[in-house]
Amino acid sequence: MNKARHIAIIMDGNGRWAELKGKKRAEGHEVGAKIVREITEFCSKNDDIESLTLYAFSTENWKRPRLEVEYLMKLLKKYLDSELENYLQHNIRFEAIGDIRAFSKSLQQTIKNVQEKTAHCDGLVQSLALNYGAQDEIIRAVNRIKNYENDITEAMLKNALDCKHDVDLIIRTGGDHRLSNFLLWQAAYAELFFTDTLWPDFTTNELEKIIKDFTKIERRFGGLK
Ligand code: IPE
Ligand code: IPE
Ligand code: MG
């Protein structure tokens, strides 16, 4: 049976969830943050799951209206400030992937602070993808190692990426069937699950069911059964 050691989620559908309820998109993001907490806690209690990587803000999301971007930045800071205690309580190590240099100094400080304060935790690793784009990640990795005098190997490039672990299972909520620049390298052999459920409606029950279906898949990695 497969183990879902590294799960990654494209948390999509916050805006549509809110619009369907006649609310502002911001409310969808706010409920979305609560779901992040629930799903993370659930994963921290499952011994098979080592890492949970969540797509929270892409390198393309800057194209959104300024007010929505500002709201998302505020929400992120609020989430991280309130979450520290919870991370420590559940032995969760927080890390950010993506280029956070684009964020305000104070948000960068919050991110670094939570990373440092949870660095000793050896339970689940929750990675938030923040100003993350896989193409940007690969380019930054190549630039880090380009002056090495010998040929670049697969292991070297992998090690220079923000996210150094292959993904076992990628889930996208919100009904679209695309990766939107998420973990392109690490997803080489990931199993992909798409659900119409909008992220604010996503539940631990649905996650449990997806994991159960994942465990039964025959993963061949190019070999034979
Ligand atoms: C995902 O929900 C959250 C972020 C991208 C920040 P969306 O905001 O993309 O919601 P929809 O897709 O418009 O419904
Ligand atoms: C993907 O959702 C990014 C995040 C969930 C953070 P988007 O809503 O930005 O993706 P597209 O625009 O539908 O591809
Ligand atoms: Mg979307």
Image: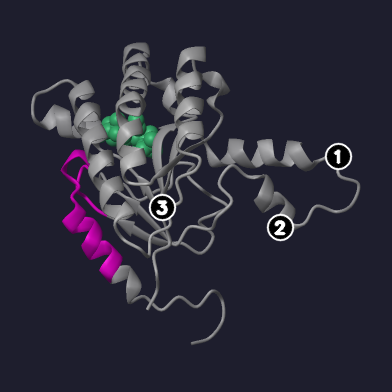
> Could you tell me how far apart the alpha carbons at marks 1 and 2 are, in whole angstroms?
16 Å
Depicted 22 relative to depicted 220: above or below: above
Mark number, residue 123: 3
State if disc 2 and disc 1 touch (CB < 8 Å): no
State if disc 3 and disc 1 touch (CB < 8 Å): no
**In the image shown, does 158 or 24 lie closer to the viewer?**
158
First in sequence: mark 3 vs mark 2: 3
Q: Nearer the viewer, mark 1 or mark 3?
A: 3
The verdict on residue 95 being magenta is no
**In the image shown, does 177 or 71 lie closer to the viewer?**
71
Mark number, residue 147: 1
What residue occupies the far left of the structure in this picture?
A: 21
Q: Give the range drawn in magenta.
A: 195-212
First in sequence: mark 1 vs mark 3: 3
Q: What is the x, y in percent for residue 84?
A: 35, 32
Q: Which of marks 3 and 2 is in front?
A: 3
Give the residue type that dot 3 points to.
Answer: Gly
